Image: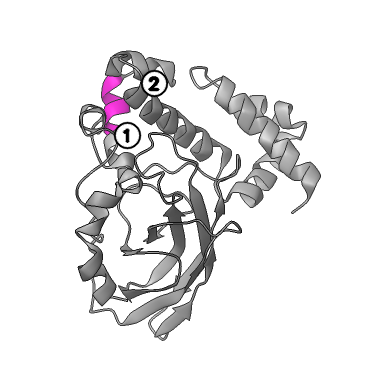
């Protein structure tokens, strides 16, 4: 990846971070990257996997998650601090992407006791499988690994299929529906599960297209420490602590 391009994208992301409450435009972001608007949008998508607008929206919700857990600000105050004029719109967007309402997220300490259910997909029975191997980060300290199948590069909402591994290693996602998907993985270092702000490990593979004639696809995923240009992790399930995950291990292992 071109270092100059990455630095330009990082400058734009820093501008987003400092202006979450502002009405930032694509022109504002492109100026901070010192690229033309059209070139900026293209290279930003190449580096991050999502558009500048979607990345900014995700950063706003990521900051809202942090404020809910670390401050006593009201939901209304938080919604305004992250650029929403309507509390109702903010609460609806938060629930659909994180999986919990802002109030529930705060009350539960950023965790949920339930893993997400697979998103039902209409149509005939599916037989395709995506399988592969999750490689640990360089320091080798990844703990439990969530791995899920999502329609975009953004880890938000409920996955199409998912599994939890005790540690990096082989995985399988069965009954994968037709479509184009991204395999996204998330983990935290052992002992950091209870932290409100651990530095996570993430990994991605995709896009992968599943057609009627495809029975299996290989998708290996390498974990790395989250970088500034990796899309924010929004789903509340990724804040699930080890105690909650333990209750699901036996069932999920049987699917691998």
Q: Which residues are magenta?
A: 87-93
Q: Is residue 24 left or right of residue 9?
A: left
Which label sits on residue 93? Answer: 1
* Closer-to-camera residue (153/245): 245
Image point (37%, 79%), residue name = 129
- Other-residue count near label 1 (Cα within 10 Å), few / some / many at <14 / 14–19 / ≥20: some
* Closer-to-camera residue (220/119): 220
Colour mapping used in the image: one colour
Q: Is residue 229 above or below residue 83?
A: below
Image point (48%, 41%), residue name = 232
In primary-sequence order, the first of circles 2 and 1 is 2
State the image coordinates of residue 246 (x, y, percent, origin top left): 24, 58
Q: CA distance from mark 2 to mark 1?
A: 10 Å
Q: Are marks 2 and 1 in contact (CB under 8 Å)?
A: yes
State the image coordinates of residue 150 (x, y, percent, origin top left): 39, 58
Q: Which quadrant of the figure contains the N terminus?
A: bottom right
- Other-residue count near label 2 (Cα within 10 Å), few / some / many at <14 / 14–19 / ≥20: many
Q: Which quadrant of the figure contains the C terminus?
A: bottom left
Q: Is residue 52 left or right of residue 210?
A: right
State the image coordinates of residue 217 (x, y, percent, origin top left): 46, 79
Mark 1: secondary structure: helix
Mark 2: secondary structure: loop
Q: Does 100 appear in magenta?
A: no
Q: Is residue 87 left or right of residue 82?
A: left
For label 2, the residue is 84
């Amino acid at each position: 990846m071109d270092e100059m391009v990455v630095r330009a994208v990082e400058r734009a992301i820093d501008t987003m971070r400092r202006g979450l409450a502002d009405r930032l435009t694509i022109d504002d972001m492109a100026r901070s990257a010192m690229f033309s608007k059209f070139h900026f949008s293209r290279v930003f998508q190449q580096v991050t996997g999502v558009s500048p607008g979607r990345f900014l929206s995700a950063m706003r919700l990521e900051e809202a998650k942090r404020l809910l857990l670390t401050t006593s600000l009201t939901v209304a105050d938080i919604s305004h601090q992250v650029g929403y004029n309507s509390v109702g719109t903010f609460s609806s967007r938060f629930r659909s992407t994180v999986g919990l309402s802002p109030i529930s997220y705060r009350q539960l300490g950023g965790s949920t006791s339930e893993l997400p259910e697979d998103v039902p997909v209409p149509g005939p029975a599916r037989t395709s499988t995506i399988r592969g191997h999750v490689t640990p980060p360089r320091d080798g300290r990844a703990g439990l690994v969530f791995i899920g199948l999502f329609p975009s590069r953004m880890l938000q909402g409920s996955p199409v299929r998912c599994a939890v591994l005790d540690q990096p290693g082989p995985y399988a996602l069965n009954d994968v529906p037709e479509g184009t998907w991204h395999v996204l993985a998330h983990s935290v270092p052992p002992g950091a599960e209870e932290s409100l702000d651990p530095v996570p490990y993430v990994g991605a593979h995709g896009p992968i297209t599943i057609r009627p004639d495809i029975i299996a696809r290989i998708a290996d995923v390498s974990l790395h420490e989250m970088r500034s240009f990796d899309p924010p992790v929004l789903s509340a399930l990724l804040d699930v602590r080890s105690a909650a995950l333990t209750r699901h291990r036996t069932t999920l292992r049987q699917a691998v």
